[in-house]
Amino acid sequence: EIQMTQSPSSVSAFIGDRVTITCRASQSVSSYVNWYRQTPGKAPTVVIYTASSLQTGVPARFSGSGSGTHFSLTISSLQPEDVGIYYCQQTFGVPITFGQGTRLDLK
Amino acid sequence: EVQLVEAGGGFVQPGRSLRLSCAGSGFTFDDVAMHWVRQPPGKGLEWVSGISWDTNDVAYADSVKGRFTISRDNAKDTLYLEMDSLTTEDTAFYYCAKDLGEQLVSYTWFDSWGQGILVTVSS
């Protein structure tokens, strides 16, 4: 099983701050990492797919990078609507696995 | 508009069984793989099981292997999860999720999710 390890587990930032969340895979997953955001009481929605592609409708302040075992999600200028829990996911092999999540909130 | 609607959740005693269903609409159901993902209240996401478009390929998380069975009826645009020998560790919100690709491993992502349904296992 491919383990996905996210850091930090939680982060607080001011509006306008640059925020970066990282995800490390226990073995290479090529570029097959996706990032989801989940808000309370809702299902997750994809933000970044295949490591660096921005999902339609997601603001351009979101970006993703990485390949192999190290990946990151960056929000260039944090906005209030960006709060939530972010999960990375690998779809390189089964079982498909998620990171443990990073809780992002406002200072 | 893509819609996924889960049903069949509820309260069940340990050791008993439950079957979840997920009705899809707004897309060609038999063109895509489908998955179940669960989330214990207040905790993270865990992929449970997935099935290819043609049912030829299925897979399970180790935590449910041998107890859960995924299936689909493409004629009814419906995904199922049969859950046997339930334990308190299976208490969670269960989401069905639509893959972008056909195969179980399509190197894609889950582009639509249901609203989730709660399964509570308790004596």
Image: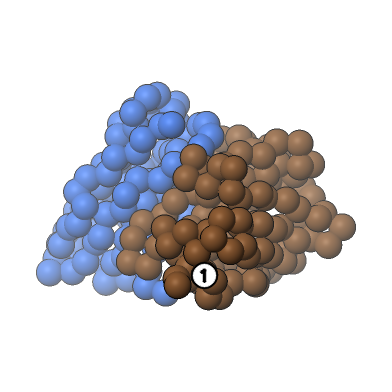
The answer to whether one can see residue A65 in this image is: no
Q: Which chain is brown?
A: B
Residue A37 rendering spot, x and y as whole percentages: 39, 59
Q: Is residue B30 left or right of residue B7?
A: right
Q: Position of residue B110 (x, y in %)?
A: 56, 51
Q: Is residue A8 visible?
A: yes
**Tag 1 secondary structure:** loop
Left or right: B117, with B20 as reference point: left
Q: Residues within 10 Å of mark 1 (few under 14, many from 20)?
A: some
Q: x, y (%) of residue B52?
A: 70, 41
Left or right, A67 with respect to B76, comes to left
Q: Please state the chain letter of the residue tagged with numbered disc 1 in the rendered image.
A: B
B113 vs B115: above or below: above
| Residue depicted at 56% across the width and 42% down the height | B65
Q: Nearer the viewer, residue B101 or B115?
A: B115
Residue type at mark 1 is: Gln
User: In the image shown, does A65 or A97 lie closer to the viewer?
Assistant: A97
A18 relative to A95, above or below = below
Q: Is residue B4 above or below residue A71?
A: below
Left or right of B51 on screen, residue A29? left
Chain painted blue? A
**Residue at the spot of label 1:** B13
